Image (cartoon, helix red, strand yellow):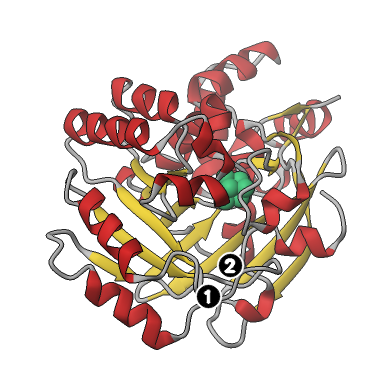
Amino acid sequence: MKNKLVGLNRAELELFAESIGEKRFRGRQLFSWIYAKHAASFEVMSDLGRELRRKLAEEAGLEWMTLEQRAASPESGSVKYLFRLEDGALIEAVYIPESGRRTLCISSQVGCALGCAFCATGALGFRRNLTTGEIADQVLQAARETGEMPTNIVFMGMGEPFLNYEAVTAAAGLINNPDGIAVGHRHIVISTVGITPAILRFADEGQPFRLAVSLHSAIDAKRRQIVPIAKRYPLPELLNAVKYYAKKARRRPTFEYVLLAGFNDGEEDADALRRLAAEVPCKVNLIPYNPALPGFERPDEASVTRFATWLSPLHAPVSIRWSKGTDINAACGQLAGREGRI
Ligand code: SF4
């Protein structure tokens, strides 16, 4: 089995260079070719010399996955990628170009064990965590495919990022490295459904990336109905962890709120959200549901606007994010689910 270089940081690439009898600075050259220039092969690494390129091709590999399917939305310009990993597992990433930004939504696990009631990925079950290399490779492959590095990265694809904490934070570090992919730390968002010990750890470690918390209801009993992990980490405990993070990191977390018609889009739901959001400096993102599973519907535009109006006394920015690409199964897990497996 060849050494895979995507996922290694600069120090690790220097060690790798030494391990094949080369000088350490070769590791730094590899770092630049892999992450800044998103090279797909050793052949293009023109400053490495033919003999070294041949040795690298023999001893090492770059890509962790192959592009299985690509679905572009003529409606929004979004592109959904379905990748096949070396063990046959399928994961998804979504590229979303909008208003000067190029956002890539990436996966952190194959499937997800948390089974949120409205989520296509949750319905697929859990297979395994992704490695740092598999996470970073989604970014590099999408960059090659689109011809440009993304400007923003969101860990909102398949899986719960904080249940794969080490690989996710290591990959975020690689994505952030200014000599590599160079996405600014404020433009990297890690989204959790509420794994409170990991939120505390994230704060204590001083991780520079932004935190988003998928709330979906500010009424604990209701939240438990759609987010089963809320039974383990109830709302008061989650809110305390978010407050701790906001204070320690001196950053506003974002509360993500998927609006499900007739379930969490009523006035009492808005009241509860307004009260909760008033307790911590934050932003609120309302996301009208992108229908993925039977039993839940997207509210109409008037209901979404009304819900936002009910929140309006809130001193926090509220935005409405219509999910892009309903025509390409852009909700996470939908494309892999359509393949009938992960
Ligand atoms: S919403 Fe997120 S945490 Fe919940 S099942 Fe889907 S991927 Fe997992």
Q: Residue at x 63, y 57 (%)?
A: 119
Q: Quadrant of the N terminus?
A: top right
Q: Which residue is mark 2?
A: 146
Q: Residue at x 44, y 64 (%)?
A: 264
**Residue at numbered disc 1:** 324
> Where's residue 229, x and y in %?
55, 37
Kind of residue indicated by mark 1: Lys
Kindly identify the amino acid type of the residue bearing the numbered disc 2: Thr
Q: Is residue 125 left or right of residue 44?
A: right
In the image, what residue occupies the spot 60% across and 41% down?
Answer: 108
Looking at this view, is 300 or 86 the one in front?
300
Give the x, y percent position of residue 61. Answer: 76, 35
Question: Could you tell which of marks 1 and 2 lies nearer the N-terminus?
Answer: 2
Tell me if residue 96 comes above or below residue 35 in the rendering: below
Q: How much space separates mark 1 and mark 2, taking CA atoms?
A: 17 Å
Q: Is residue 139 visible?
A: no
Q: Quadrant of residue 180?
A: top left
Quarter of the image for residue 238 reads: top left
Q: Determine the residue positioned at 60% across, 32% down.
A: 132
Q: Is residue 57 above or below residue 101?
A: above
